[in-house]
Image (tube, rainbow, N blue to C red):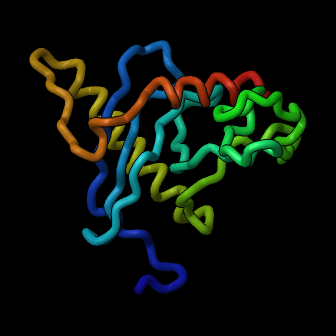
Amino acid sequence: MKRKGETVNITEVRVKLTEGKKNRLQAFCSITIDDDFVVRDLKVIEGHKGVFVAMPSRKLTDRCPKCGGKNHLMAQYCNDCGTKLNEKRASRGAGRLKLHADTAHPINSSCREQIQEKVITAFREEVEKSKKPGYKPPKYEDMEDIDYDDFREDLESEKSDT
């Protein structure tokens, strides 16, 4: 058990670069802590001040008042019955719409900085490897079925919120 003040022992970082250099989403990553615990779907994103690591998150949903079907908060109509949904049902946090919730995240800034440093270092190493002739992206089962389009849509909706 880690005691307060001890560093996080990240024993492995896996990086899967995304296609296309123009996307804000640069890579998906997974980290292994103490060779015992894996956190998947960290994202390396090109921000206005450089790359940063976004923690895994899920889309927030609510239920249709008519049929009870689950819908993303940006949906205008129910996916199940087609009823028009209230446009103002998403809550605001820090002035912008809160559309996602972290599923895993560091509790303090020291842990966040350690994760960010390890992931960005591994990301930059993978980018350098990708520039060499004959580069083959790593094959990781946990990263093979990623739907990049979902994340592109999420990033676009976040960009339009700011």
- Residue 135, compared with residue 126, is above or below; it is above
* Placement of the N terminus among the 4 image quadrants: bottom left
Query: For this view, does 5 lie left or right of residue 63?
Result: left
Q: Is residue 75 visible?
A: no
User: Splitting the image into 4 quarters, where does residue 84 fall?
Assistant: top right
User: Residue 85, image x and y in percent?
Assistant: 83, 33
Q: Residue at x 54, y 39 (%)?
A: 52
Query: For this view, does 62 lie left or right of residue 95?
Result: left
Q: Residue at x 37, y 35 (%)?
A: 146
User: Splitting the image into 4 quarters, where does residue 26 fall?
Assistant: top left
The residue nearer to you, when weighing 123 against 17, is: 17
User: Residue 4, image x and y in percent?
Assistant: 54, 83
* Placement of the C terminus among the 4 image quadrants: top right
Query: For this view, does 122 lie left or right of residue 71?
Result: left
Q: Residue furthest left?
A: 134
- Residue 108, compared with residue 138, is above or below; it is below
User: Splitting the image into 4 quarters, where does residue 37 fall?
Assistant: bottom left
Query: For this view, does 75 lie left or right of residue 89?
Result: left
Q: Residue at x 40, y 58 (%)?
A: 39
Q: Residue at x 88, y 34 (%)?
A: 86
The residue nearer to you, when weighing 49 against 100, is: 100
User: Residue 147, image x and y in percent?
Assistant: 41, 30
- Residue 38, compared with residue 128, is above or below; it is below
Q: Is residue 67 visible?
A: yes
Label total for image:
0
The residue nearer to you, when weighing 73 against 40, is: 73
